[in-house]
Amino acid sequence: MPAGPFATGSGRLPEYVAVRTDSSGRSISLADYPPQRWAVLLTGAQGMGKSVELTRAELAARQAGAIVVRVDASPREALEDRFARAVTQDLGSLRKQHGFRAVRKLNKLLKTLSTGSKLSHSGGDVRVGMPPLTMSVNHGVEDTAGAPTGQLTQLADALNELGQKKRRAVVLMVDNIDVASDRDLSALNELSAHLERTGQPAHLVTAGGQKAVGRLLAASQKTTGVESAIAQLYDIRECRPLGDDEALAAMRSPLAKLRIPAEAAAVTELVDAANGSPQRLQALAATATAMAASQPLGLDSRVAKAAVEQLTSQSRPLYEALWNNSSDGEKDLLARTAVRGTRGLAMSSVTQQAGPEHWAAVDSSRQSLKSRGILRQGEESGRLRFADPGMLRWVQTHVGQSAAHLGVAMPTVTLGAGSNGARPAAARRTAGPGQAVTR
């Protein structure tokens, strides 16, 4: 069982927003529960704290003395280019720690891989620096039909050889793999399979959205020599919405640190408004503590309501952008879900109205809204609900105001309109401003 730099007790971490657990109640943090594979995939919807967990793993690994290289994936630049620049940026530090001779082989490999490459320009972020070095020439497996070149594997082996001289593990980290190319995903799969076969004290830790697993699987099926199921290559850890106990503990922590008195009902009100979102919970905690610090009674229901209203008001431009960036089918599903309020929308009724010929389109909209973190779907009930109660209110108001202004229902395309008796959006009755639309 791989453990390496992530073994329990490998280093103390600063306190974070919440301790995340999986469906079995185990911590998803690599600092608390060591990886079960040499490669790890942190996945989940937007705003679920994947990057935070990646940072926790990074801090734990660094405190354990590992050689850590972290980059963000980019649609315009290959992963090997990003890793090469990051390692090159860190060569000075590696020389101080391991000596000139020990680093010489690694430096030679970087120069060999970068020979003849052109400078790569990208607006993406590389965590460890971006000197002008790329490595885009073929070396190893021939790069045809999207197959990986083996450069990440070579670099990982070279770093591992360097680390073993002083018994230091190696950790390669990639955030935001959603935007990575199929070629980059194939390279990650190849590296994962290589680490699994060799059992080297080197780890690959990646983070991506809910579609990451499917994309990695599709990439593995196109790659010669990497035929294992994704679950056999990666320890997959899902960043799910926070449970009530996790959220309550996270909300109470800053209040206790600042010695701010708090009513239990007010804390619960903030947790309910966060609705399991670590991102929104953190924003609410910051807003509420700032308000409560100047109040003689600390955090009471009045302060909690004001904090929720302030954050909701500040989030309106975000809600509008999320709506505007949605397709017609997604907007229709959002409107249908808003009609149902906190009860949620039963997908069975939507698919029944749409008809079999439109099921694929409906499901595509559902999956997209879930992966973007806008909607959630209950595991047992299957009902769709808004992840952010503030956006639920915004959509209800937006649809109602649009209808009131035009004097007609909002002109949105309804998936499956005209089939199996389904009514188009224009046929649905809408309420006045600030009220939920109804059927």
Image (tube, rainbow, N blue to C red):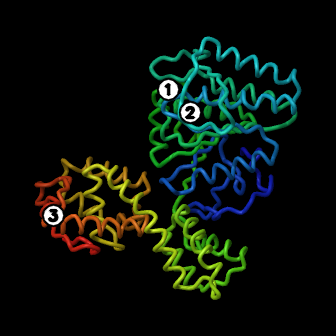
Compared across the picture, whether 290 is left or right of 368 comes to: right
Residue at (27, 63) in percent of width and height:
335
Given residues 301 and 380, the one toward you in this image is: 301
Given residues 50 and 193, the one toward you in this image is: 50
User: For mark 1, what is the residue?
Assistant: 223
Question: How many neighbours does mark 2 have within 10 angstroms: few (below 14), some (14-19), or many (20 or more)?
Answer: many
Work out whether mark 3 precedes mark 2 in sequence or the reverse, and give the earlier one: 2
User: For mark 2, what is the residue?
Assistant: 189
Question: How many neighbours does mark 3 have within 10 angstroms: few (below 14), some (14-19), or many (20 or more)?
Answer: few
User: For mark 3, what is the residue?
Assistant: 406
Judge whether 155 appears above or below 290 on screen.
Answer: above
Compared across the picture, whether 181 is left or right of 285 comes to: left
Q: What SS does tag 1 mark?
A: loop
Given residues 437 and 218, the one toward you in this image is: 437
Judge whether 32 appears above or below 437 on screen.
Answer: above
- The N terminus lies in quadrant: top right
- The C terminus lies in quadrant: bottom left
The amino acid type, in three-letter code, at marker 3 is Leu
Judge whether 360 appears above or below 116 on screen.
Answer: below
**Separation (CA) of disc 3 from disc 1:** 54 Å
Residue at (55, 36) in percent of width and height:
124
Q: Nearer the viewer, mark 3 or mark 1?
A: 3
Given residues 325 and 174, the one toward you in this image is: 325
**Residue 428 coordinates in the image, percent (x, y):** 15, 66
**Separation (CA) of disc 2 from disc 1:** 9 Å
Q: What SS does tag 3 mark?
A: helix
